[in-house]
Image: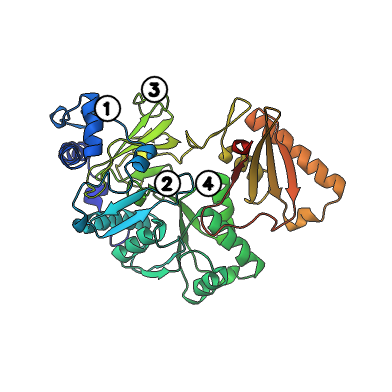
């Protein structure tokens, strides 16, 4: 399964995993309480002392952390070690407000790269592979995480970063890349360009590790078919460490969470109540091995389901479903909860490319939903009446999926700006009115 496969950890018994988590949680709570005044204040306000936390059964007693807390504590308020012990920062984009800055000791980086190495091996990677990393580098965690994981596995690593698609494809062909790591939207763009250039036979890819944004099963199948690969999901957050918090194995029935480093919970996003296995709710993570920036009960806002069902791959760590949307980014339109993934599912099932944009406006106190969808080159040759018929079909399909009316506008191929990083799918203009 690859030279970096760690069966003693990844296939440990549930009893052993529980023992690791109990011991590490107790130690981490004391560490945070003693060194992070911001979180100590939250615990004190809730009347919780470190000695109250004796095992994972007591995790629910701890207060939650949110992204608002991270912004309020910016930049050093959640740092748990002396600054001189830190060797790196990573940061979020800051597109929804003040940036979140995460700190790392060398120990933290080593463990993070271990997690990414596990993801590469789970996708079939070994020291015989050429790993083509097209995630962004710099402050974004995608590039550095997979780059370090690839080194741990011993693969030849191409630190391509995002952008310059012509060079990406040239190196992919010349150096015979076998594993592609990037956002799913950029993988779709690369696949589209490769087909336009007729280079399918030059590509030696066997697998892709895609994350950092939501993508549907339909998009996965489309990428797999065009690139001739098996596409694996990977999950992570800058706040927790970066990609590699969880990853898919060959069974692709969920993403295994690295439970020796993270404790996962699913809660009711309204009440905060912890939900049992199989219940859909908001994902919450507690870091139990990170030194510099250890977050306890961090609310990710991602909606998913946890499962402890036995996996045929042999790994015993709990699995999380692909995020089904976000409790904060979910669109509420005319009182209806709308997730972009629902719209993408309809479009891909109807044979449209994964290039679309959702525009929400408010006129006379009424919400309006428009979906702009690129046509394929074959569709673009349709008559006006055929285009109108296609638009009506999509309107009906979206109404059946969402329960509300959405205006559909079919646009020419290449009209919607391609993304080399995270795709901008939603433009909500309601706050402008």
Instruction: Report, in whole angstroms, how far the alpha carbon at label 3 lies from the one at label 1.
Output: 13 Å
Q: Are marks 3 and 1 in contact (CB under 8 Å)?
A: no
Q: Do the residues labelled 4 and 1 touch (CB within 8 Å)?
A: no
Provide the residue designation for mark 3. 271
Assess disc 4: are there few (<14), some (14-19) or many (≥20) residues with their C-alpha within 10 Å of its C-alpha: many
Q: Any mark on residue 215, and which?
A: 4
Image quarter of the C terminus = top right
Viewed as shown, does residue 310 lie left or right of 394? left
Q: Nearer the viewer, residue 360 or 156?
A: 360
Q: Is residue 125 above or below residue 276?
A: below
Assess disc 1: are there few (<14), some (14-19) or many (≥20) residues with their C-alpha within 10 Å of its C-alpha: some
Image quarter of the N terminus = bottom left
Viewed as shown, does residue 33 lie left or right of 123? left
Residue 407, percent from left and from top: 73, 37
Instruction: Report, in whole angstroms, how far the alpha carbon at label 4 lies from the one at label 3.
Output: 28 Å
Residue 33, percent from left and from top: 18, 37
Instruction: Indicate which label's residue lies in the foreground, 2 or 4.
Output: 2
Assess disc 3: are there few (<14), some (14-19) or many (≥20) residues with their C-alpha within 10 Å of its C-alpha: few
Residue 286 quadrant: top left
Q: Any mark on residue 312, and which?
A: none
User: Which secondary structure lies at badge 1?
Assistant: helix
Q: Is residue 334 above or below residue 149?
A: above
N-term mark: 2 or 1: 1
Viewed as shown, does residue 374 lie left or right of 209? right
Name which residue lies at 46% across and 50% down.
212
Instruction: Indicate which label's residue lies in the foreground, 2 or 1.
Output: 2
N-term mark: 2 or 4: 2
Residue 76, percent from left and from top: 28, 48
Provide the residue designation for mark 2. 98
Assess disc 2: are there few (<14), some (14-19) or many (≥20) residues with their C-alpha within 10 Å of its C-alpha: some
Residue 370, percent from left and from top: 69, 39
N-term mark: 4 or 1: 1
């Amino acid at each position: 399964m690859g030279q970096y496969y760690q069966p003693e950890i990844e296939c440990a018994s549930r009893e052993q995993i529980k023992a690791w988590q109990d011991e590490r949680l107790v130690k981490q709570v004391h560490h945070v309480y003693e060194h992070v005044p911001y979180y100590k204040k939250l615990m004190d306000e809730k009347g919780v002392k470190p000695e109250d936390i004796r095992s994972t059964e007591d995790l629910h007693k701890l207060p939650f952390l949110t992204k608002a807390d991270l912004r309020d504590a910016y930049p050093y308020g959640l740092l748990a070690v002396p600054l001189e012990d830190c060797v790196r920062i990573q940061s979020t984009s800051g597109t929804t407000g003040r940036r979140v800055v995460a700190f790392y000791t060398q120990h933290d980086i080593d463990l993070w790269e271990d997690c990414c190495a596990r993801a590469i091996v789970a996708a079939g990677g070994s020291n015989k592979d050429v790993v083509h990393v097209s995630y962004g580098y710099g402050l974004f965690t995608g590039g550095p995480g997979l780059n370090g994981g690839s080194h741990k596995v011993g693969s030849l690593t191409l630190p391509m970063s995002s952008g310059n698609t012509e060079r990406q494809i040239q190196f992919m062909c010349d150096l015979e890349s076998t594993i592609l790591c990037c956002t799913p939207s950029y993988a779709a763009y690369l696949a589209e360009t490769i087909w336009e250039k007729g280079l399918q036979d030059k590509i030696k890819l066997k697998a892709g590790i895609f994350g950092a944004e939501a993508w549907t099963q339909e998009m996965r199948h489309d990428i797999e078919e065009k690139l001739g690969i098996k596409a694996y999901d990977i999950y992570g957050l800058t706040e927790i460490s970066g990609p590699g918090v969880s990853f898919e194995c060959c069974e692709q029935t969920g993403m295994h969470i690295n439970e020796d480093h993270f404790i996962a919970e699913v809660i009711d996003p309204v009440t905060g109540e912890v939900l049992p296995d199989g219940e859909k709710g908001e994902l919450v993570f507690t870091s139990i091995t990170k030194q510099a920036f250890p977050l306890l009960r961090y609310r990710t806002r991602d909606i998913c389901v946890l499962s402890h069902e036995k996996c045929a791959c042999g790994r015993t760590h709990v699995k999380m479903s692909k995020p089904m949307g976000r409790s904060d980014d979910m669109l509420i339109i005319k009182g209806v909860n709308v997730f972009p993934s629902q719209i993408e599912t309809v479009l891909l099932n109807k044979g449209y490319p994964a290039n679309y944009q959702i525009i929400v406006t408010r006129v006379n106190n009424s919400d309006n939903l428009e979906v702009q969808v690129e046509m394929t080159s074959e569709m673009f040759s349709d008559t006006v009446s055929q285009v109108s018929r296609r638009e009506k079909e999509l309107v009906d399909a979206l109404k059946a999926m969402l329960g509300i009316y959405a205006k559909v506008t079919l646009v020419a191929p290449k009209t919607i700006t391609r993304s080399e990083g995270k795709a901008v799918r939603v433009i909500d203009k309601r706050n402008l009115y």
